[in-house]
Amino acid sequence: MNETTKTLSFAAVAGLLALAAVVTVPRYRPPEVFNDLGQAFYPEFKDPLRAAALKVVEYDEATATAKEFKVELRNGRWVIPSHHNYPADAKERMAKTAAGVIDLIKDTVRSDRPQDHEQFGVIDPLDDKVTTMKGRGKRITFRDAEGRVLADFIFGNEGREGVTFVRVPGQKRVYGLTAKPEISAKFEDWIETDLLKLSASSLRRIRIDNYSVDEVEGRIKNRHEILLTRDDSSGPWKVGEMTDQEEVNTENITSMTGALDDLKIVGVRAKPPGLTRELKQGDQRQLNQQDVISLRQRGFYLVRGELQSNEGETEVVCDDGVIYLLRFGEVVIGAGEELTAGTSADKKDEKKEGTEGRYLFVTTRFDESILPPAPGAPPEFAADPAWTDEEKKQKEEEHQKRKEEVERQKKEREDKVAAGQKRAQELTNRFADWYYVISAENFKNLRRSRAELVKPKEQPK
């Protein structure tokens, strides 16, 4: 073979090799791990008003238990099942919370390895197959009215620059989110916390009845009453039976009226159905054994046929004729749901660690006599023979105006009576179902002694 032939042979082989190399080079394909970036987690969940139930599950490492908080729409009412189906103020909050979930986008991929779930804090808090207590996240599930899952997430730890790790239950992949919705599992965030729904400016009379109940002997002890009154919303408060050497302690009275205005619900306990029914029907209560046991557990007792409180009571009179009676019961101590919802026994344990609260039993009624009396009708018009025709006409017009003004005032009072009766009944229906828990601070502000409401008068220098 001559040199020319060899050269051509080598060139042909080189060309074939080059062609084979071009044909066999793999085309570039983006890694599958990035295929879903920028997409919504649940693209079919677009209408926040479809959300009819929310469940939040958090893991308590101290007790090695998963704690659930639910808000559900039942028979047209939002309720909190974990708190005895207490009414939730959830319509707008649920829609806003669901809207925040709908907008969540898969920003970054962090891992596809199940062994990394603990590091990112996205282990399912409901997974009983995992032995570790660490690395469990917060699971949040939305469902529609038929119980179908709309969205389901496990939110984990936060990384650098505010990135939150999240995983969809049943999937291995862990994502990083730059935005995280604020989803509360706190009882107070889902209810109307303003317990009494009154304004401090509407208060006209406060009667503080300080006493204690001797549970062994079944009698009242250490009883003394304090009466506070004022004439109008801007007038000064007066304390009954003050001496010339005393004056009102305005600071403490303001703290008390402020506590009434802004009295917050810390927790709730359901009353027995029989007790609830009797309270809604009126003050005449035929209490059975279940009712009595329920009352005693929370510091309320029947003493000679009358319902009394372990730590006294306060009566509050408003200018619209609505009268509140606040009965203060036993101490309750706990943390989290233990304080807000309690247990079936709810036993007092002063050695228990946690926040201190106080049981409160509230009733309302309406007293028409609180309102200003209706004006009397003017006497019949009688013309004086000495009047001229012009004077008679003028007197008749004045008399007619007085009659019309009296009728207007009567109608205005009738409307106030109807409004007061309606408000008292609405409050009765609200309070009848529940024992409330209030904070120890509010209890201290409401159960004032006389020494706290008056002080020695400052002598002129």
Image (cartoon, rainbow, N blue to C red):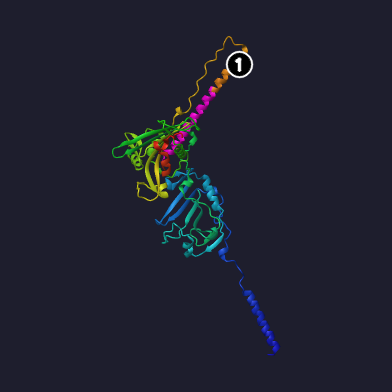
Q: Residue furthest front?
A: 461
> In this view of the protein, which residue sits in the foreground, 430 or 24?
430
Categorize mark 1 by other alpha carbons within 10 Å: few (<14), some (14-19), many (20+): few
Residue 408 drawn in magenta? yes
Say whether residue 66 is visible: yes
In this picture, residue 228 sits left or right of residue 164? left
> How many numbered circles does the render carry?
1
Residue at point 63% right, 76% down?
21
Residue tagged 1: 394
Q: Which residues are magenta?
A: 406-435
In this picture, residue 380 sits left or right of residue 351? right
Above or below, 80 against 318 in this view is below
- Considering the whole magenta stretch, tell me its main secondary structure: helix
Q: Quadrant of the N terminus?
A: bottom right
The type of residue carrying mark 1 is: Gln
> In this view of the protein, which residue sits in the foreground, 39 or 122?
122
Residue 326 drawn in magenta? no
Q: Residue furthest top?
A: 385
Q: Secondary structure at mark 1?
A: helix
Q: Position of residue 340 (x, y in %)?
A: 42, 47
Q: Position of residue 92 (x, y in %)?
A: 53, 45
Q: Position of residue 457 (x, y in %)?
A: 43, 34
Q: Residue furthest left?
A: 217
Say whether residue 288 is visible: no
Residue at point 64% right, 79% down?
17
